Amino acid sequence: MKILSDFKFIYFILVANTYFIVSGCHSNKEKNSVTQPNIIWINVEDINPALGCYGDPNAITPNLDKLASEGIVYKNAYSTAPICAPSRSSFVTGVYSTSMGTQHLRSRIDKPDFIKTLPEHLKDAGYFVTNYAKTDWNFSADGVFDYWKQDLAPWRHRPVDKPFYSTFVIGGTHEGAANREDIYQRQTDGLPKENFHNPDGFPVPAFYPDTPHFQKMWAKYYDLITRMDMIVGEIMDNLEEDGLKDETIVFFFSDHGFGMPRFKRYLFHSGVHVPLLVYIPEKYKHLSNNRTAGSATDQLVSLVDLAPSVLNMLGIEKPEYIQGQAFLGTDPEPVREFIYTERSRADDLFDMSRAIFDGQYMYIRHYMPYLPWIREGTIQGEESGKESYEQLHRLYAIGGLSAAMEKLFHPKPYEELYDLKADPWEMDNIIDRNEHKTRVTKLKKELARWSLFTRDIGFMPEAEYMIQSEGSSPYEIAQNDEIFPIDQIMQAANLAGSQDVQGISQALNSQNPVIVYWGIIASRSLETPNPRITEAIRQALNSPSPSTCIAAAEALCAQDECNEALSVLEKWILDERPWVSLQAARSLVEIGPKAKPVLPAMYEAQKLLFAGEGGTRKYKDFEYASFTGWALERAIINCGENPL
């Protein structure tokens, strides 16, 4: 007996020593040593709900379908913007991008220290936080993560006593891969031959040209989705292999719709409708808001709701500044009645639209309706290097597009309304039908309430709020009624698209340069030029606000009154503040060959943006420098010359 006892003692010592040796880098079957659940966010780029679990017959997504069968499928989930960085800044903070000034792509925004990202909140709560690939939040991610590598099992690097939060950004479905053959080939490497989709007769969206070229493009997009599904499968396999699946809540979602024309960058339902799957293990089912595994729900959910939902699930108090609504946890908030979305500057294309969706009807308000959706430039041009846009330009030139696609090349209506039940592809704008007047009034009123409540800083031009927020942040100046009297500014902005000559004249004579700016923008939709308004715009060339000066110069050139206007644009494209020079450069594109006298200054401005020899890109950064450079290139080409 004594020999057996000695053996047991020796065995215990050996096992204990082995445990302490490996405790810093976990064994495969280790469970959490804490009661809080682990959290995983799998964020994929640029897809609508094109998955088998959403009933898409063309999708080959076995791993996501399995996740859905064990979790909850949210059929009505929406991003807050139809483009990446604004959407990401919103879902990682629980604050709308339009409140933080992060609604443009891309920008460098300072945010108040008290506005924290979800990983920062969880880090404070004792979580080990990791990131895979990019953040793209429009503000710095320095110091946020404990571990940041291309690793599909990052939790293996955490201390044994910590739960983990891991976010994965999977970029294989990005518009670049969908539009360029070389990227597509890289991203589909490893996809089994039998999982490639047959392009012959592959279905395309109803508003797309049903041509072999577009059939092939959409078939390839679904190939990318299948390859992405394989990566999700690897993450889930790693989790299961490590014995952690029953300890981990998993969210799967996209940042916005497909990376194709009339999806990404377009404020339609198609641009913001995204997949959202949530897997909640049995031991945490009390956090599911009474949803059962394998269920689907029509509940409206915005991605701005993700961060507060995780906080609620973990029993962490929701900060007052968070605007999203917790839809999961022991104390979920009331089900939302509306989805609110926005579209602002994308790359070098200035624009502004806001939208509201009630689950059936989508109301869209355009604040720069004189601008078409598809415009000259590096991102959407016929020489953009993107197959989809190149094909659309070719077909537009020969009259080969549907009415729904052709209208993208023309000025927008200032309002749109779509019934998604009757018209899922949003091809019939029913805004003028008498039977919808009451509904439109309700939606407009609610959209205005949301803009006022969230202090939508997008009603101030980007360059203006960047200048005003020096030493502070756009969020903070948006709260200041003296700097940003939002109700007065919105009243002026709502003149856009109208023929209210008296209202526009009053706005142009305001002492507030932002209200004057909106008077100029509204004047662009007037059917008949008005001498009194033209004179007021001419006076605005001397505004203390660069944005107002630039808008006035562009408006005057649109009326063939370029003499004074060109000297103003020449001045501002050489301004050292990047948000100012970008706006001026884009105005030079919009006025076309009339900008020719400014060519010497354009070349000078372009030189200032170059990265220099030995760099991997032409311009200094992939933000303002590139966007301004692209705009200058197009403006120079419009004047019949070659850019540097």
Image: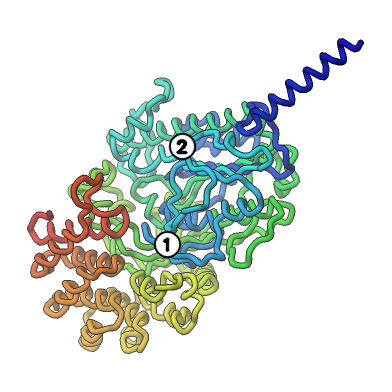
Query: How many neighbours does mark 1 have within 10 angstroms: few (below 14), some (14-19), or many (20 or more)?
Result: many
Name the residue type under label 2.
Gln
Quarter of the rendering occupied by the C terminus: bottom left
Left or right of 444 on screen, residue 379: left
Instruction: Give the residue at x 17% y 67%.
Output: 591
Q: In which image quadrant can residue 222 be found?
A: top left
Residue 22: x and y, percent?
A: 64, 28
* Label 2 – label 1 distance at C-alpha: 28 Å
Instruction: Give the residue at x 38% y 50%.
Output: 264
Residue 79: x and y, percent?
A: 49, 53
Q: Which is more toward the observer, 412 or 574? A: 574
Residue 641: x and y, percent?
A: 7, 57
Residue 146: x and y, percent?
A: 54, 46
Q: Which residue is mark 2?
A: 150
- Is 58 drawn above or below residue 39 in the view shown? above
Q: Which is more toward the observer, 400 or 16? A: 16
Q: Which residue is mark 1?
A: 103
Q: Which is more toward the observer, 411 or 378? A: 378
Name the residue type under label 1.
Gln
Element on which disc 1 rests: loop
User: Which label's residue is closer to the chain start, 2 or 1?
Assistant: 1
Quarter of the rendering occupied by the N terminus: top right
